[in-house]
Image (cartoon, rainbow, N blue to C red):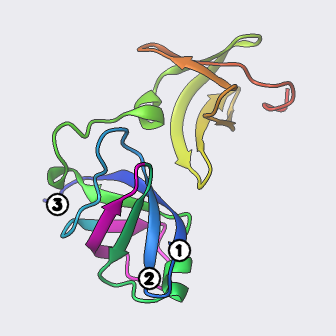
């Protein structure tokens, strides 16, 4: 049976003419993309193979510059911008547990003014910020996980200060 895959980074931009990409790690600790790591790029597109191997990776303090084995030019790299990079869990270090927004899935979302909104059911990782997907009154609403909207998070809830109109209420 194959290993489960976990999202570890988002591709935020193409860089250079030889297919190099800038990836924003999801993990707050050390970056997880390393030479030789097998990965999957999702969502799939027709420009590159879904399954790749990291050919090289360097860390600049916040993002990683990465080359994948099957992405050799700027055109192919450009088609990957916005995609997530997933790695097999059994290839990741033990200390690479869920952190940040992904760790909040299942927690209650509580707004300072509106009270309980519902549960965080997913996290969509965009190029600028993560979006919390909250099940709210029979529909899903997206809430940016950024200050000043995101006030705090603890073991039971994500505390928010949603501006008027954000939830369509």
Give residue 154's position: percent from left, percent from top. Answer: 45, 14
Disc tally is 3
The answer to which of marks 3 and 1 sits earlier in the sequence is: 3
Tell me which residue sits at (44%, 49%) in the image: 62
The answer to which of marks 3 and 2 sits earlier in the sequence is: 3
Which of 149 and 118 lies nearest the eye of the viewer?
A: 149
Query: What quarter of the picture does the N terminus occupy?
Result: bottom left
Instruction: Work out whether 33 lies above or below 38.
Output: above
Instruction: Work out whether 48 lies above or below 116.
Output: below
* Circle 3: element type: loop
Q: Which residues are magenta?
A: 40-61
Q: Report the Cα–Cα distance between label 3 and label 1.
A: 30 Å
Q: Nearer the viewer, mark 3 or mark 2?
A: 2
Tell me which residue sits at (46%, 26%) in the image: 106
> From the viewer's perspective, is 160 left or right of 124?
right
Q: Which residue is mark 3?
A: 2
Give residue 57's position: percent from left, percent from top. Answer: 30, 66
Tell me which residue sits at (39%, 84%) in the image: 71
Q: Which residue is mark 1?
A: 14
Instruction: Work out whether 88 lies above or below 38.
Output: above
Give residue 15's position: percent from left, percent from top. Answer: 51, 75
Q: Which residue is mark 2?
A: 19
Which of 68 and 123 lies nearest the eye of the viewer?
A: 68
Q: Residue 163, can we see it?
A: yes
Asked if marks 2 and 1 touch (Cβ < 8 Å), the reply is yes
Tell me which residue sits at (44%, 55%) in the image: 63
> From the viewer's perspective, is 17 left or right of 163?
left
Q: Nearer the viewer, mark 3 or mark 1?
A: 1
């Amino acid at each position: 049976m194959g290993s489960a895959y976990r999202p570890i980074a988002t591709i935020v931009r193409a860089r250079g003419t030889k297919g190099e990409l800038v990836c924003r790690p999801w993990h707050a600790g050390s970056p997880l993309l390393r030479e030789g790591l097998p990965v999957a790029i999702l969502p799939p597109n027709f420009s590159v193979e879904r399954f790749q191997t990291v050919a090289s990776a360097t860390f600049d303090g916040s993002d990683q510059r990465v080359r994948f084995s099957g992405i050799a030019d700027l055109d192919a790299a450009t088609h990957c911008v916005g995609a997530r990079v997933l790695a097999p869990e059994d290839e990741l270090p033990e200390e690479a547990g869920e952190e940040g927004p992904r760790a909040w899935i299942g927690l209650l979302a509580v707004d300072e003014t509106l009270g309980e909104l519902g549960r965080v059911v997913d996290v969509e990782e965009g190029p600028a910020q993560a979006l919390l997907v909250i099940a709210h009154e029979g529909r899903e609403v997206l809430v940016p996980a950024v200050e000043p909207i995101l006030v705090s998070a603890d073991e039971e809830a994500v505390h928010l200060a949603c501006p008027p109109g954000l939830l369509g209420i």
